[in-house]
Amino acid sequence: MTRVGLSLPQLGGNVSRDVVRGFAERAEELGFGSLFVQQHLFYPLNPASGYSARPGLAVPEAYRSILQPMELLAAVA
């Protein structure tokens, strides 16, 4: 049987310890097989070509606040 995983919420100012914990607990209750996180090595503050190479398009506000992946996984383990 194929197991499906979910990506933990980790972007934006509304993501908190309680939100992440509740998400992980609910995913386990529903039988999801794994949890994933995003890794951002670099953050473009003012990209010369615009966000996603679109002139004038700003970096989304959610990307200005991101929980660190290793700490996030440790917190829900």
Image (cartoon, rainbow, N blue to C red):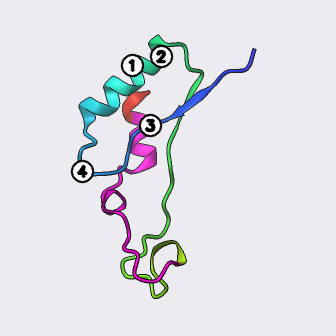
Q: Which residue is mark 4?
A: 13
Q: Quadrant of the N terminus?
A: top right
Q: What is the span of residues highlighted in magenta in the rendered image?
A: 54-74
Residue topped by disc 3: 8
Is residue 30 a member of the stretch shown in magenta? no
Q: Which residue is mark 2?
A: 28
Which residue carries the number 1 mark?
25
Pointer 4 local density, CA inside 10 Å: few below 14, some 14–19, many at least 20: few
The CA span between labels 3 and 2 is 12 Å
Quick check: 33 left or right of 50? right
Q: CA distance from mark 4 to mark 3?
A: 14 Å
**What x and y, as percent, mark residue 43?**
43, 70
Against 25, residue 20 (above or below) is: below
Discs 2, 4 touching: Cβ within 8 Å: no
Location of residue 74 by image quarter: top left
User: Is residue 3 shown left or right of residue 63?
Assistant: right
- Determine the secondary structure under disc 1: helix
Residue at screen point 57% across, 27% down: 34
Q: Earlier in the sequence, mark 3 or mark 2?
A: 3
Extreme residue toward the right, this view: 1
Q: Nearer the viewer, mark 2 or mark 4?
A: 4
